[in-house]
Image (cartoon, coloured by chain):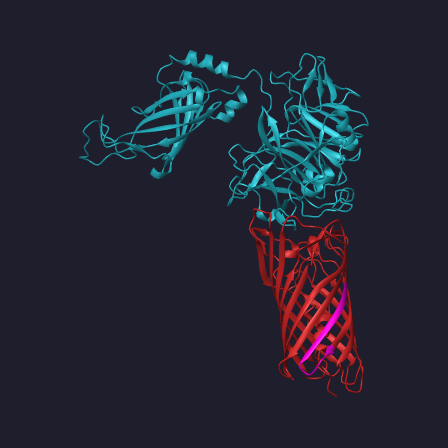
Chain colours: A cyan, B red
Amino acid sequence: MRLGLAALLTWSVAAIAEEAPPFYINPGLNDAWFNADTPGQGFLLTVYPDIQSVFLAWFTFDAERPQDGAMAVLGEPGQRWLTAQGPYSAETAELTVFSTQGGVFDAASPPAATDPAGVGTMTLEFADCTEGLVTYDLPGAGLSGEIPIARLSNDNVPLCIELAEAAIPACSRPEPDRSHGVDDPVVTNFHMVPPIDIVDGGPGPDGIPAIDNPVFEDRAGPSTPDPQQLVVGIRIGDQVRAYPHDILDWHEIVNDNFLVNDQPQPLSLSYCPLTGSAMLWKPFEDMNDPTFGTSGTLYYSNLVLYDRETKTLWSQMLEQGIRGLRVTDIPDRLPVVETTWETWSSMYPGTQVLSRDTGYSRNYDDYPYDDYRDDNTILFPVPNLADGRLHRKQRVLGINVGDHSKVYPILNFPAGIEVLNDQVGDMQVVVAGSRDRNLGVVFSRQLEDCTVLEFEAVQNSLPVVMRDSEGSEWDLFGQAVSGPREGTQLQKTNSYIAYWFAWTAFFPGSEINP
Amino acid sequence: MKRLLLTAGLIQALCVGEPVQAATCSCAGAPVLIYLDTTAVEKGQFFLSYTAEDHQINDLVSGSQDVPDETGRDRSTFSHVLSASYALSDYWSISALTSYVEHERKIGSSFFPKARSSGMGDSVILLRYTPFFITPFRRHELSFGAGVRAPTGENEAADFFILSEDMQPGTGAWGGIAWASYSYAFNQAATVQFHASANYLHNGENDRKYTLGREYNLASGFSHSLNSRFGYSALLRYRQSDPDRRFGFELPNTGGEWLDFVPAVRYSFTDRFSAALSGRIPIWRDLNGALQFTTSYSWAVSLRYGFR
């Protein structure tokens, strides 16, 4: 099938995406491709599915005809060829265009050379197995444009159709955003956010000292928190640890180590007392020093960490580098559960608890910010303060899915466990929370095979909090602990608990669960 | 009738007040009042003084308890203060001050380098009324004054980011000052004097919606002139500062009460030119909140010249 030129020029991926399921680039596209309006020119295309890459050879001519009398030993002086290669995803490949120079026909010397930076870029888009669009930009030559292409022969079309259909996922479970920030942040001079929004908190870098050598006690040790004291709970395999807020208020970061597959795994827990938010990050594997410190700065009144290797600043609530060499990088996150010590220690009697023997002289019985937890005080600049739908310091469980965000006020949960089957954006979620136990967690309730589970609350069986319609029971960390789905892990979400004013500063316009 | 100056000028200056405090640690050290020259009281007297002060701000305090600081913090402020006083008449005089301030902050355990800021500090002008002053025939001196602190200082100093308020050379806000002092000479030559002063500093809000806490200062002490060249003084100075505010909200860990011992010695090279060395040593403090960094000590060298 061939489309006319007019039809090809109006071809657009967006239009196709609206009217037809997405096409998937596959080795069935390996072929010779050309534009009927430019005879004698064309492309040879090879798709490498194992490395998700496309290689393309472009046979064409110079932008102008050679001067009269120009000579070539082999071929015609105006002939040109270029190559391009790069990754593909779904129906699109983003390629770098290369120009190889300096060689001689069928000779090793002088060696031909290719500038690895390339001479331009090319986007390759396919609507289906028979039509595509090449968009090129060759800035050195001042050339850019689009070339609709079609196959020279349709021999491979059936194979292409078969492979494209096989490549379509059985279902399309939404993946959680990796970052809470904008999808395509503008980076200026190594800053992802306006420098004026990053403010000096006063104590200076490391003025609030991170705990680098945490000591742990068993639950009956001298550092046992009060029953209603909030703790950040971590469970990694059979290692269960609690980090009381009253210690975190003074240190904000604990650089800890766990054993994962018998190998030490550094993890950094951060807690911002000004925004009431706790995160657990897995440092990047290429970090020689995997620890973080307090930068002494705040972004929207929220903790800004720095990694001790590159001194990149990281926004805790954006969970992203915001200034420095690793700007826009996103660390891997692991789930934490915040609840009362009474609840945590009853769920996990073997838990360890962070010791007050931190190496620093601090009065952990004294909260360092007066009445800040309960009053309306704001200590540093934050946007969107006018959103007074909730008390500024009300603790909310927030979830962010693309452009959608929603909060579940902890106080709105009943005394016992409540489970909500909900949808935020295009993500089906399940929320479990309890007012009296001061906890809330949210997971995707769509499994990898796209099954969407319905949950109901389970009372008095913590850490089990819910049961699905198939009879499996699930715990606070989103793991099925019994039933047909035993061992299955629900997909984590972009979610955490924070004070309302902080959540709405980062995610203005959030929906509030009544 | 000539006023008996001797060490009075020294101690009157030291009686005036305290450095402006700021931010989350009640530790800023930009002196706008403490080195204000208030010596001139007799018509036509004109004094000019320069003071260099080193203010170390590394004591970690919880309420009134000293707390070990394992972070190795090194916070200091170095100030250059130029002050003048001129007597418009035997009753009315005017004092003025401007400053240049350098702040440094380094956390010893930190991977970050030292943060620095410097720039013009705030300025003060104070109008004083002295209904009577010490002469060979009068043992008492009383002065009242009112003035303003003008935000002439740099208030957007940055080290990548705008630094915290306590690291700014200037406050960025206007302030109002009410001031009173009293002196009593124990002998006709006024070689031994008692001094007392009180002042109040009201701070306005700066562009970042930050307001330094209101300050109340009381000081009293004695001065002794051993001869026409050499004198010394000793003061106790009490200061109470309200918490700072941002957006109108009180900031935790700011404000409190301080009691300092302020010794000083002065040597007069000539009738007009003198030098002084003074210090400030904390005796007691009770600071708001759970933890504050505050003054460890300060010392200053002053030079003063009288034009008449």
- Residue B1 vs residue B64, the one in the foreground: B64
Displayed quadrant of residue B270: bottom right
- Residue B148 vs residue B192, the one in the foreground: B192
On screen, B16 above or below A439? below
On screen, B308 above or below B176? below
B226 in the magenta segment: yes
Displayed quadrant of residue A142: top left
> Residue A500 placed where, x, y %?
72, 38
Displayed quadrant of residue A477: top right
Q: Is residue A273 visible?
A: no
Q: Residue at x 77, y 87 (%)?
A: B136
Tell me which secondary structure the magenta stretch mostly adopts: strand
Q: Is residue A50 visible?
A: yes
Q: Is residue A96 left or right of residue A366?
A: left
Q: Which residues are magenta?
A: B224-238
Q: Is residue A334 left or right of residue A414?
A: left
On screen, A214 above or below B96? above
**Is the N terminus of chain B in the top left, top right, bottom left or bottom right quadrant?**
bottom right
- Residue B298 vs residue A233, the one in the foreground: B298
A173 in the magenta segment: no
